Amino acid sequence: MKIENLLVVGVGLIGGSLALALKRAGVVGRVVGCGRRVAGLEQAMRLGVIDAYDTDLPAAAARADVIFLGVPVGAMARLLESMAPVLAEGVVVTDGGSTKRGPLSAARAALGAAFSRFVPGHPIAGSERSGVSAARADLYDSHKVLLTPETGTARDAIERVEWMWRQAGAVVESMDAGEHDRVLGITSHLPHVLAYALVDFIARSPDATRCFDLAAGGFIDFTRIASSDPVMWRDISIDNADTLASSLDRFIDALVVIRQMIEQGRGDDIEQLYRSAREARERLIDKRGGV
Amino acid sequence: MKIENLLVVGVGLIGGSLALALKRAGVVGRVVGCGRRVAGLEQAMRLGVIDAYDTDLPAAAARADVIFLGVPVGAMARLLESMAPVLAEGVVVTDGGSTKRGPLSAARAALGAAFSRFVPGHPIAGSERSGVSAARADLYDSHKVLLTPETGTARDAIERVEWMWRQAGAVVESMDAGEHDRVLGITSHLPHVLAYALVDFIARSPDATRCFDLAAGGFIDFTRIASSDPVMWRDISIDNADTLASSLDRFIDALVVIRQMIEQGRGDDIEQLYRSAREARERLIDKRGGV
C-alpha cells in the first residue's frame, strides 16, 4: 500500500504535517513539494518535510501516485485544470480543504473521467498558525478526517485515502459533502467570521487602544482563530457563502433576542440561556475527555 | 500596612485567590470567609484559603479591617446594606466585580458617610472555572487590577487597596468607572455574550449533535468563556446593559456588512477585513509578549 511518489501541492501546515506524519509511519517513498514560492519549498526541504520540489505542477503531477492539495479552496480549480491532462492511470487526488462542495465541483469540471479518482477530504485539525514551519508529524494524531466521496468515486481511491490518513494517525469518517459544509459552516466557519468581525469591530472603535490594553485571557482565546490565514478563510467564506449567510442571519436573530433580554433586564431568561450554553459546552468537553 | 483581619465575602475563584496571594506575601493576619454555603466555606478552610468563617455577615464585618466582596455584582447592594451599620472606623471596603458603575451606586446608596471607604476594583484575571477549588495564589501575578475611585473616595483607602493588590502580585491602574464599563463592555462582556449565544445557537440547531461531534480546537477555545458562571455573567449583563445593548447593536451592524460581502462574493473586501483583524490581534499579542 506504500505511496511511492507523494506530491504535496501547497506545503504549509496541512500538507507539510501530512508529509511528516506519513514519513513517521514509514509508508511513503518520495515526497515532492509543489508551490509558487521557491523560498517556502527550500524551507520545507531544510525541515525534512519534502525530499524534492518542482515548480512545474504538470511535470510533478505526471509522476505522482497520490496528489494532495493543501491549498486554499479557491486555488484548487486552477491547479486541478493544469494537472488534469497528465494524470497517470490509477492516481489518487485528494485535498485538505475546509469546504467540500467547492473542491468537488472544481474537480468534476476539471478532471473529466479522472473525477472518479478524486477523494475530497478535510482533516479536523489545524492551528491559527500557518506555513511549513508550523507543520508537525503529530498534527493529525487521533483527529478526525472527513471524506466526502460521491457515488462515482472509485472504491479503491477512497480506500487508499482512508489508509493514508490512518497511517497519519487520524480517524477517518465519511459523510455527504453538503452535510459537511452545513455542519462545518456552523461549528467552524461561523466562529471564524465572528472572531474576525469582533477584532475588526474593536480595532475600529474609538476606544481601540484602551480596549486592547485591557484585553484579558478570555479575549485572547476567543479571538485566537482571528489569527488564521486571511486568504484561506476568504476562500472558505466565499465557497460556503450560502451556509454562512444563512447562519449569520439566524445568529443575528439570536443576538437580537439576547439584546432584548439584556435591555429589558430579564435576568431569569439571561441566566437560563447562559446556563444551558454552559451545560451544552460542558457535555461537549466531557465527551471529548477534557479540553 | 499588614491587614490584621481580612474578610472575604464570597470565597470563590476571585476572593479565594486574593486570600491565597496575600497569605503567600505574608501580609495578612487572619482571613475570615463569609458566604451562604457552609460546605463551600468548609472546603475553603480545608484548602487553607481562609482561617475561619462566619455566616453572620454583620458580625464578621464589624471585626474586619479590609472587606473584599468577591460576589456577583447583583448581590453587592444587599451585602453592603447589611454591613453598613456595623463598619469600623477606618475600614476599607473593596470588590472584584467586573462592572464598576453598579457596585459604586450600590455602595453610595448603602454606605452613607462610609461611602468614602469604598474603593471599587476589578482584577483583570480569572478563568472560566469558578469556586474556591479553582483559587490560586498566583492568579493575579502580573495581571492588571483596575480601580475606579470617585472624587470623594478617601486617599488612604485607595492607597491601602493599591498596596493590597501589589502584594497580591498585580499591577494597579486607576480609571473612571464609566470608561471601565464602556471598555470592558466591548473587550470582555460582549465576547462573553457572543460565546454564550453561539453555543446556545448551535445547541438549538437541528444539526446540534453532529455539530458538537465535529467541533475542532478552534471552537473549543472560542467558546471557553461560555463555560463561565451564568449568575455572575447574568449580573454583569444587566449591570452593564446600556453598553452591552449598544455594542451589540453596532456589532450586529458590522455582521450585516460582512454578511453582504460574503453573499456578494466580494473576496477582496473579505480578505482585507480578515487581514486587518489578524494584524490587530498580532499587534496585541506582540505587545503582551506572547499568548
Image: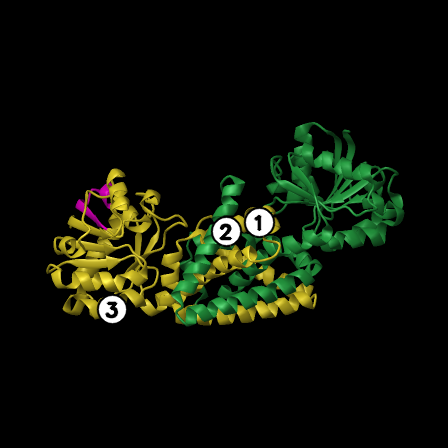
Chain colours: A yellow, B green
Q: Could you say which is closer to the camera, residue B290 or residue B113?
A: B290
Range shown magenta: A21-34
Q: What residue is rendered at 64% in x and 64% in y?
A: B246
Q: Which residue is mark 3?
A: A150
Q: Was residue A131 drawn as part of the magenta stretch in this picture?
A: no
Q: Could you say which is closer to the camera, residue A149 or residue B177?
A: B177
Q: Could you say which is closer to the camera, residue B273 or residue A171?
A: B273
Residue A81 located left or right of residue A258: left
Residue A40 horizontal/vertical position (percent): 28, 45
Q: Secondary structure at mark 2?
A: helix
Q: Is there a contact, CB below 8 Å, between mark 2 and mark 1?
A: yes
Chain letter of disc 1 in the image? A
Residue A224 located left or right of residue B93: left
Q: Which residue is mark 1?
A: A212
**Which image quarter: residue B58?**
top right
- Whether callout 1 and callout 3 share a subunit is answered yes
Residue B211 showing in the rendered view: no
